[in-house]
């Protein structure tokens, strides 16, 4: 990892990088903001309009799309995928290819200190509460309360963490 832009990274000029951000190789960042002291592993894409807070860890092969807000101190495991369209389509009803503006982005929020296990899929419109833990491989289809531990497909409550 490196804390400077290099030839193995695609970082657009419109990216707001905080102080002491560490960036892995083969990443793609554009139109997003990354908070201070956040670490982003290799093969991660963060799209336009996404926000990642301070002191987060985004592990390799994760995808953070437009409309996603990740608050401070969040752990994102390897291969975590976010969605931002509940009914994705390649074409419009008339058969023409869809482009920006042909769908509405639905926002998702991951609150402070939450942890998302490897290969979790987070559907759009979800709020994951502060300190919540999402089990590896889970598909999150509903809001997760603060401090909850959920896992499965679809993710279901297992327990609540004690403070």
Image (cartoon, rainbow, N blue to C red):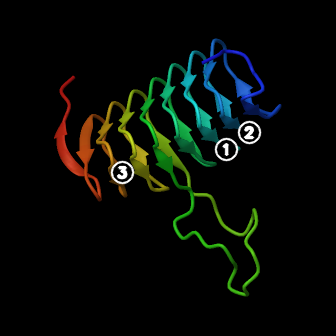
Residue 45 appears in which quarter of the rendering?
top right
Residue 36 versus residue 132 in the image, above or below? above
Whole-percent x, y for residue 66 in the image: 63, 48
Residue 2 versus residue 85 in the image, above or below? above
On the rendered structure, is 79 left or right of 68?
Answer: left
Of badges 3 and 2, nearer the viewer stands: 2
On the rendered structure, is 133 left or right of 50?
Answer: left
Q: On the image, numbered disc 3 is attached to which residue? A: 143
Quick one: which residue is furthest to the bottom in this view? 94
> Residue placed at 72% from the left, 16% from the top?
4
Instruction: Choose the circle earlier in sequence order: 1 or 2.
Output: 2
Q: On the image, numbered disc 2 is attached to which residue? A: 30
Quick one: which residue is furthest to the top in this view? 20
* Disc 3 to disc 1, C-alpha distance: 22 Å
On the rendered structure, is 40 left or right of 117?
Answer: right
Instruction: Choose the circle earlier in sequence order: 3 or 1.
Output: 1
Q: On the image, numbered disc 1 is attached to which residue? A: 47
> Residue placed at 75% from the left, 64% from the top?
101
Q: Is mark 1 on a helix, strand or loop?
A: loop
Q: Are marks 1 and 2 in contact (CB under 8 Å)?
A: yes
Whole-percent x, y for residue 42 in the image: 58, 31
* Disc 1 to disc 2, C-alpha distance: 6 Å
Q: Where is the C terminus found, in terms of image quarters?
A: top left
Q: How crowded is mark 1: few (under 14 residues within 10 Å), some or many (20 or more)?
A: many
């Amino acid at each position: 990892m490196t804390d400077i832009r290099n030839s193995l990274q695609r970082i657009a000029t419109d990216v707001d990088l905080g102080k002491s951000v560490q960036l892995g190789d083969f990443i793609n960042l554009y139109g997003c903001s990354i908070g201070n002291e956040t670490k982003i592993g290799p093969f991660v894409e963060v799209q336009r309009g996404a926000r990642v807070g301070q002191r987060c860890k985004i592990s390799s092969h994760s995808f953070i799309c437009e409309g996603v807000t990740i608050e401070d101190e969040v752990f994102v495991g390897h291969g975590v995928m976010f969605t931002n369209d509940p009914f994705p389509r390649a074409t419009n009803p008339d058969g023409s290819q869809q482009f920006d503006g042909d769908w509405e982005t639905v926002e998702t929020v991951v609150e402070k200190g939450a942890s998302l296990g490897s290969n979790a899929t987070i559907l759009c419109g979800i709020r994951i509460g502060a300190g919540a833990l999402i089990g590896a491989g889970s598909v999150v289809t509903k809001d997760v309360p603060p401090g909850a531990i959920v896992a499965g497909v679809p993710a279901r409550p297992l327990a609540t963490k004690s403070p």
